[in-house]
Image: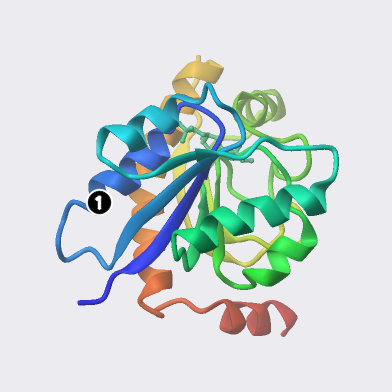
């Protein structure tokens, strides 16, 4: 079996990266991680990659988004990456980078998009907003990345209840558990062609 070559982009602790790395230990899993890239040198996720011998790179973000995107693409190309998985990566990708990897970039977001998404909505802020809204349900979404933040076609979602007495921490932990299951499964569906970007875009337009 030929395995799809994934780049995983991270900024933080990398528990989703870990879930993907764990999934790739199964020889029947249809993808492998060929490179991990962080915009932050101190991201613990880099350590997780190094531990299992996956090349880990830092690409510092400059004020010029196009130039940052070009440097990122150079690293991905040097490792022959075919797919890009954002796993807690907090930079907004330059539209030219998104176009270059059109239909081959995935992101995971800790809410049921389109609810609680968009610029500035990441990590704890999302759970804070969910709790403040009084919503009875939350979850996570894996979607294709397009130029518009958090608005690309949805590949998969998982739901969790919001329980009385929940704090940001308890809700985040319940959502994270689902993320770690959902992301490797969504990657499997996309790299095997079960879910296709162009089909989802056509559906969105209907
Ligand atoms: C995850 O919950 C992910 O959904 C979220 O950041 C966390 C990263 O955790 N991403 C966003 O909020 C993107 N808007 P991790 O570093 O442990 O995988």
> What percent of the width, then of the height, locates residue 45?
43, 31
Colour logic: rainbow
Q: Which residue is drawn at 67% across and 35% down?
A: 60
Looking at the image, residue 182 sits to the left or right of residue 42; the answer is left
Q: In which quarter of the image is residue 32?
A: bottom left
In the displayed structure, 22 sits above or below 173; it is: below
Relative placement, left or right, of 137 versus 120 is: left
In the displayed orientation, state which residue is furthest to the left. 27
Q: In which quarter of the image is the C terminus?
A: bottom right
Residue 11 in view, yes or no: yes
Q: Closest to the observer: 199 or 70?
A: 70
In the rendered image, the quadrant that contains the N terminus is: bottom left
Q: Residue at x 64, y 60 (%)?
A: 145
Please state the horizontal and vertical placement of residue 102, each as a whole percent of the image.
64, 72
Task: Say whether residue 150 is visible.
Answer: no
Residue depicted at x 66% and y 85%? 202
Mark 1, residues whose alpha carbon is within 10 Å: few (<14), some, or many (≥20)?
many
Q: Mark 1 sits on what residue? A: 23
Q: What element carries label 1?
A: helix
Residue 154 drawn at (x, y percent): 57, 63
Q: In this view, does 82 lie above or below 91?
A: below
In the figure, 162 relative to 27: above or below? above
Which residue is farthest right?
A: 64
Q: Does the residue labelled 1 lie within 8 Å of ligand 1?
A: no
């Amino acid at each position: 079996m030929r395995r799809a070559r994934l780049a995983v982009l991270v900024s933080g602790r990398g528990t989703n990266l870990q879930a993907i790395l764990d999934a790739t230990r199964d020889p029947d899993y249809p993808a492998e991680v060929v490179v991990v890239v962080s915009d932050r040198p101190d991201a613990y996720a880099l350590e997780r990659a190094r531990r299992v011998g996956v090349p880990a790179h830092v690409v510092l973000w400059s004020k010029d988004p196009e130039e940052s995107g070009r440097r990122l693409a150079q690293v991905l190309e040097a490792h022959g990456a075919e797919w890009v998985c954002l796993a807690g990566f907090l930079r907004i990708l330059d539209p030219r980078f998104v176009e270059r990897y059109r239909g081959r970039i995935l992101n995971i977001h800790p809410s049921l998009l389109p609810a609680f998404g968009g610029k500035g909505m990441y990590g704890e802020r999302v759970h804070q907003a969910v709790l403040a809204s009084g919503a009875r349900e939350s979850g996570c979404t894996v979607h294709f990345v397009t130029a518009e933040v958090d608005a690309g076609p949805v590949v998969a979602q998982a739901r969790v209840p919001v329980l009385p007495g929940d704090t940001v921490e308890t809700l985040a932990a319940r959502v994270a558990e689902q993320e770690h299951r959902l992301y490797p499964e969504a990657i499997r569906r996309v790299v095997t062609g079960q879910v296709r970007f162009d089909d989802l875009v056509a559906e969105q337009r209907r």
